[in-house]
Image: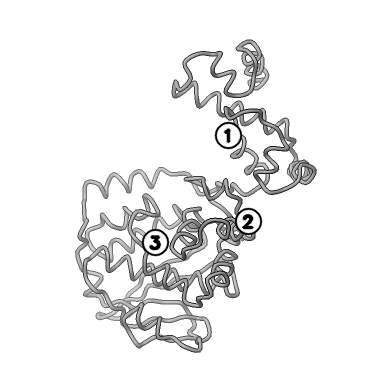
Amino acid sequence: MQTVDHISFSNFILDTAGVTGSPRQRLARAAELPDWVLASGDTMVPSTHQLRLWELVEHEVGDPDVALRVGKTNTMGRFGVHDYLFSTAPTLGDGLALSEQYADLITTNIGFAVSGESEEVANADVRVLNGHGRGQQLAMQFALAAVVTRARNATGRDVHPVRIRFRQRAPRRHDRFVEMFGTRRIEFGAPTDQITFRVTDLALPMRTADPVLADILCRYAAMQPPPLRLAVTWSGQVHQVLIALLGDGRVTIDRAARIMATSTRSLQRRLADEGTTWTRELDRARSALVEQRIRTGLDGTQASLARRVGYSDPGTLRRARRRWSN
């Protein structure tokens, strides 16, 4: 099963862990996340890249508790509409329910469900659906820490879970876990990854509850297409690189290959494996950009639009548009 995560996760991990400059580029490329992917504002990438990034970041900073540290700084707004669906809900329990319902806005790799255990407590079970090893463990530590941090920030209360469970084996020290979650009831080697909340905490009102905005956001989220934006196919990479390059000088396959940290020959071979070619992808990017610029009126004349997509004159652009429509 292939699952995807929003690219904002990878950027958040790198930013909060303090990985900048050339180490950031090196780790991103080692996780198969080229610079242009990190610069994209709305791209879904295979979850395996984020799990690999967790492992690389832990090694780079030398901190086995880096995922807890990143989760503890999970400020509202980094994950777009999903964050605001949570924060505008009337209560913490309602916010967690919306997080479960619309999780695929930011990831299809996390299963999240809240269910009552008794009249006093309820369990939030969290599952990584696709992944294993240390990357999976770090992703789960982050997920549980981020949920608790969001609960505290949104309610303005120092919410302390009754119990935390991890499937991973116990680390040599877990004082940072106790510090993060505010409870000594932390179990390792458990059958599930889980946060146990007090029912009274789930009834806490949200500081930023806004029923009107919440209704608008719910209707907007319900209209979004399934998260199938897998930008990290080779043709997907080429398309986004071309959209960025068109209008910025001469566009060549050599230049695109350098940006994507590969060779021209390898890029041609990868595109052929996906049943396409450089010429076909260049046409596809030109067509998409032309239609977008015409629709929004961003280019005043046909001549300026032709220059933007790499044609010498409007006549060449007109002939190309006829070809694209056939």
Kindly report which numbered mark, 1 or 2, lies closer to the viewer in this rendering. Answer: 2
Residue displayed at 50% across by 13% down: 301
The residue sitting at 53% across, 56% down in the picture is: 21
- Name the one closer to the observer, 200 or 83: 83
Q: Position of residue 134 (x, y in %)?
A: 58, 75
Is 77 displayed left or right of 257 in the figure?
A: left
Compared with residue 105, is residue 116 higher up or lower down, i.e. above or below?
below
Mark 3 and mark 1: Cα distance apart in space: 34 Å
Residue type beneath disc 1:
Ile
Q: CA distance from mark 1 to mark 2?
A: 21 Å
Instruction: Provide residue 173's location: percent of width, then percent of height.
Output: 46, 88
Q: Please report contact status of discs 1 and 2: CB closer than 8 Å, yes or no.
A: no
- Report the residue marked by disc 3: 100
At x 31%, y 81%, the residue is 182
What label sits on residue 243 in the rendered view?
1
- Quadrant where the N terminus lies? bottom right
- List the residue tagged with mark 2: 29
Which element carries disc 1, helix, strand or loop? helix
Amino acid type at image mark 3: Glu
* Up-down relation of residue 81 to residue 98 (above or below): above
